[in-house]
Image: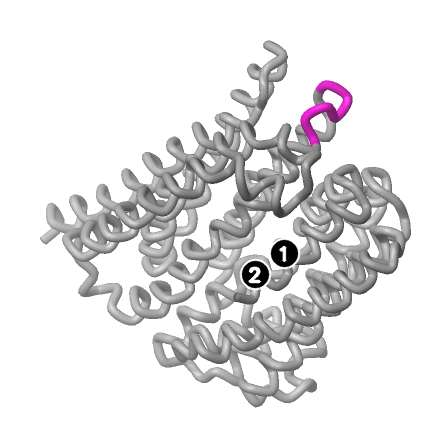
């Protein structure tokens, strides 16, 4: 519900301000997200597992939030000129406030408590705020940088709601970071930072590359398909949020049978849902984005073929997170990202759509994570 509300802004932008503006916004947000990822640095995921395993929440929040705020500020300062070069200075400055707002959120406390209701409500309030402001500004014909203010506004609303539910004091969020907190788990945290950066490179490289190759000729269709992929990946994200605290709490008793059972269920559902989504694309793409978006339907259909594979990798990724095996998870993402880049460059050199590159890389990632998950089970049996 929350994501659909936020996506209403995308649909109105495409109709009122044009697909070109939507494409520029997509590229800018993809680059700004590097600051968000660097600001998180994997600390949020680490906090979920530590709180779920019984560590005191207030100490984890203080150590996590203060470091995230500092990292997000530094990374935002670095990223703003790059965003401005790809779009405009007003758009870059407006979007740059989002990473800091997200860094102040303590949603990892709610996830560790398995309080899915509060997490959902925070996202609904935040994205409804985004939708209201963004849709209103678009309908009034505001410039794209002013419409983009909807996104940091939504992040602020969600953060205020989350922190109200967790009961965290603001003095715990802002202050000098405790480097002792980092040193106590430096190996795991550095692995998470590398992992999160690699993951975002993996998820953003196609859009960024589309803005470069062929003079940006494929940018609109790839940006539109990427937006829809974010919408249809909601089940995978919800699945990860639900499974992580459960797997982390029972990691020593986690069996291959349980992982395979969960994976089979989600892949079966993904194949059924994915088939409908791909076949129906010629109907809902023009309906949502306007008649001009009909040319992007083939790229949308190709990119959305990865839906069942993405659901499978969500289960496998959570297993590796629960095992704190971020090194091999990051390696799997890294290999898949390189494959995506190489395939995209090859397709571009042949004057073909680069859309299939992300599907190929997702399959490669599924293979890599499968090897990482099930080879661990084999080694454990051999040790026993």
Compared to residue 208, the image places residue 5 above or below, namely: below
Q: Is residue 328 visible?
A: no
Compared to residue 130, the image places residue 223 above or below, namely: above
Q: Would you identify the image quadrant in which residue 168 lies? A: bottom right
Disc 1 to disc 2, C-alpha distance? 6 Å
| Left or right for 178, reference 320 | right
Where in the figure is residue 145, as x and y percent of width and height? 85, 53
Predominant SS along the magenta part? helix
Q: Are the residues at dot 1 and dot 2 in contact (C-beta closer than 8 Å)?
A: yes
Q: Is residue 199 visible?
A: yes
The residue that disc 2 covers is 3
Assess disc 1: are there few (<14), some (14-19) or many (≥20) residues with their C-alpha within 10 Å of its C-alpha.
many
Residue 122 is a magenta residue: no
Compared to residue 147, the image places residue 335 above or below, namely: above
Magenta-highlighted residues: 214-219
The residue that disc 1 covers is 7
Where in the figure is residue 324, as x and y percent of width and height? 37, 57
Residue positioned most to the top: 350
Q: Identify which residue is drawn at 61% across, 45% down.
A: 287
Say which of 279 and 40 sits in front: 279
Q: Would you identify the image quadrant in which residue 146 lies? A: bottom right
Say which of 196 and 291 sits in front: 291
């Amino acid at each position: 519900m929350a994501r659909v509300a936020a996506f209403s802004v995308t649909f109105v932008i495409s109709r009122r301000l044009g697909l070109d503006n939507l494409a520029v916004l997509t590229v800018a947000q993809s680059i700004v997200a590097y600051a968000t990822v660097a600001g998180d640095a994997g600390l949020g995921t680490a906090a979920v597992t530590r709180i779920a395993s019984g560590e005191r929440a207030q100490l984890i929040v203080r150590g996590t939030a203060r470091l995230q705020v500092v990292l997000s500020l530094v990374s935002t300062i670095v990223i703003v000129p790059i965003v401005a070069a790809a779009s405009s200075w007003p758009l870059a400055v407006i979007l740059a406030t989002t990473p800091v707002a997200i860094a102040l959120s303590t949603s990892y406390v709610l996830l560790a408590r398995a309080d899915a209701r509060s997490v959902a409500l925070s996202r609904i309030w935040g994205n409804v705020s985004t939708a209201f402001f963004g849709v209103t500004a678009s309908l009034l014909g505001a410039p794209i940088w002013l419409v983009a203010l909807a996104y940091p506004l939504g992040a602020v609303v969600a953060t205020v709601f989350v922190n109200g539910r967790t009961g965290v004091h603001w003095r715990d969020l802002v202050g000098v970071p405790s480097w002792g907190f980092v040193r106590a788990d430096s190996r795991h945290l550095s692995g998470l930072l590398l992992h999160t950066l690699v993951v975002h490179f993996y998820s953003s490289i196609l859009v960024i590359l589309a803005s470069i190759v062929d003079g940006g000729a494929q940018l609109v269709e790839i940006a539109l398909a990427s937006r829809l992929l974010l919408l249809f990946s909601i089940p995978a994200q919800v699945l990860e949020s639900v499974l992580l605290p459960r797997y982390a709490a029972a990691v020593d008793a986690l069996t291959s049978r349980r992982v395979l059972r969960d994976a089979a269920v989600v892949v079966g559902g993904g194949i059924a849902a994915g088939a409908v989504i791909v076949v129906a694309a010629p109907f809902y793409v023009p309906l949502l984005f306007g008649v001009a978006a009909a040319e992007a339907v083939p790229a949308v259909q190709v990119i959305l073929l990865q839906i069942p594979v993405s659901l499978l990798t969500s289960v496998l990724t959570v297993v590796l997170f629960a095992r704190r095996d971020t090194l091999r998870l990051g390696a799997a993402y890294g290999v898949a990202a390189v494959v995506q880049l190489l395939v995209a460059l090859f397709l571009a050199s042949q004057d073909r759509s680069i859309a299939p590159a992300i599907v190929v890389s997702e399959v490669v990632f599924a293979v890599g994570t499968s090897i990482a998950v099930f080879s661990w089970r084999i080694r454990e049996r051999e040790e026993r």
